């Protein structure tokens, strides 16, 4: 357990950040699942869902939750799947 004042503050900060990061990652995973489900159903709304998912992924990358290359890779793979639908 932290004993210095600064260490206690760091502990509080890291807990806040962790909760925020977990929340953002969860949103990303949920939206990716929605896109994949739409692709499997060959849904016409898949492109709209992809658009909102890309936005979510980009925001996560800009906040530092995801690395920018990871975000780019996710977007690329999802876009590829949507484009295969035609």
Image (cartoon, helix red, strand yellow):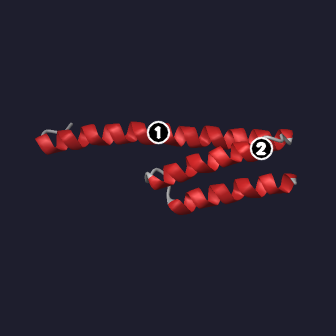
Q: Is residue 44 left or right of residue 8?
A: right
What residue is drawn where x is 55% and y is 53%? 58
Mark 2 and mark 1: Cα distance apart in space:
26 Å
Q: Can residue 55 be seen here?
A: yes
Would you name the residue on which mark 2 appears?
Answer: 46
**Element type at mark 1:** helix
Coordinates of residue 5 in the picture (x, y in percent): 12, 40
**Element type at mark 2:** helix
Q: Nearer the viewer, residue 54 or 69?
A: 54
Mark before the other along the chain sequence, 2 or 1: 1
**Which numbered disc, 2 or 1, marks the residue closer to the eye?**
2
Placement of the N terminus among the 4 image quadrants? top left
- Total tally of numbered discs in the picture: 2
What residue is drawn where x is 49% and y is 41%? 24
Placement of the C terminus among the 4 image quadrants? bottom right
Q: Is 59 rendered above or below residue 22? A: below
Could you say which disc has been placed on residue 31 in the image?
A: none
Q: Is residue 34 left or right of residue 1?
A: right
Q: Nearer the viewer, residue 66 or 56?
A: 56
Would you name the residue on which mark 1 appears?
Answer: 22
Q: Is 31 rendered above or below residue 84? A: above
Residues under numbered marks 2 and 1 in contact, where contact means CB atoms less than 8 Å apart: no
Q: Quadrant of residue 10?
A: top left
Coordinates of residue 27 in the picture (x, y in percent): 56, 38
Assess disc 1: are there few (<14), some (14-19) or many (≥20) residues with their C-alpha within 10 Å of its C-alpha: few
Q: Is residue 42 left or right of residue 28?
A: right
Coordinates of residue 81 in the picture (x, y in percent): 78, 54
Q: Quadrant of residue 12?
A: top left
Q: Is residue 48 left or right of residue 67?
A: right
């Amino acid at each position: 357990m932290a004993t210095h004042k600064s260490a206690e503050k760091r502990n509080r900060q890291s807990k806040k950040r962790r909760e925020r990061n977990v929340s953002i990652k969860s949103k990303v995973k949920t939206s990716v699942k929605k896109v994949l489900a739409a692709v499997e159903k060959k849904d016409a709304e898949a492109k709209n869902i992809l658009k909102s998912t890309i936005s979510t992924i980009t925001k996560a990358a800009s906040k530092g939750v995801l690395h920018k290359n990871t975000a780019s890779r996710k977007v690329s793979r999802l876009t590829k799947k949507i484009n295969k639908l035609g």
